[in-house]
Image (spheres, rainbow, N blue to C red):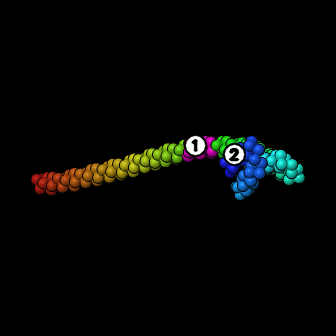
Amino acid sequence: MESLKSISHVFILKNKIDSAVFALKKAKGIAVVYEDIESLQEITRNLSECHQKNGDWKTAMDYLRESRAYQDTLSQQLTKGLIYEVNYEQEKRKVSELELILKERDLQLQKQYSWIWIILVIALSLIAILLVFLRLNKQKRRAAEIEKENVKKQKEISDLISRQEQAELKAMFSGQESERNRIATELHDDLGSIL
């Protein structure tokens, strides 16, 4: 297509208008297939100029209108492109703002999770300390109970020892008493026989 446009320019410069029109029409057919609006605008403007040089004013005017229509289409596309670009920039800014908001929320969540972990660790530590304290307290109570039992058993043992000693003393006293009585009886009997 570009080569056909270049050839048509050469023909226009050499004033071979019919050959230029033929090349431009071929280039226009290719531009229509590829929907190249910019090339179509340029080609129809050149066709209008060629028909002006040939004195075909009506066809020149038709091509000029067609060229202006393509120019309007280009302007609309450019405007739409600018609008799309502005919309794109606005959307891009919105996306950036949303990303910043998401990052801030992520940071807040991380802080909250950090505080939750800190509170959880402190709570678990307190529970562990409480359990240790309760266990030590239980061991102290058990030791006190064992000590009471030992004191009670020591008292029972000392009571048993004192009862046994008393029993031994009673047995010894009763043995002594019976021995005295026996000796006294023997003495009495011996004295009675001596007298």
Q: Which residue is mark 1?
A: 114
Q: Which residue is mark 2?
A: 6
* Relative depth, front residue between 172 and 91: 91
Q: Residue at x 86, y 53 (%)?
A: 59
What crowding class fits label 1: few (fewer than 14 Cα within 10 Å), some (14-19), or many (20 or more)? few
Residue 81: % across, % down: 76, 46
| Residue 186 sits inside the magenta stretch | no
**Alpha carbon of mark 1 to alpha carbon of mark 2: how far?**
71 Å
From where the camera sits, is residue 71 visible? Answer: no
Q: Residue at x 10, y 53 (%)?
A: 194
Say whether residue 150 is left or right of residue 23: left
| Residue 109 sits inside the magenta stretch | yes
Residue 176: % across, % down: 22, 51
Q: Label 2 is placed on what type of residue? A: Ser
Q: Residue at x 53, y 44 (%)?
A: 121
The mark that comes first in sequence, 1 or 2, is 2
- Per the rendered image, the range of residues in magenta is 105-120
Q: Residue furthest left?
A: 194
* Relative depth, front residue between 95 and 6: 6
State the image quarter where residue 12 is shown. top right
* Relative depth, front residue between 143 and 58: 58
Residue 158: % across, % down: 33, 48
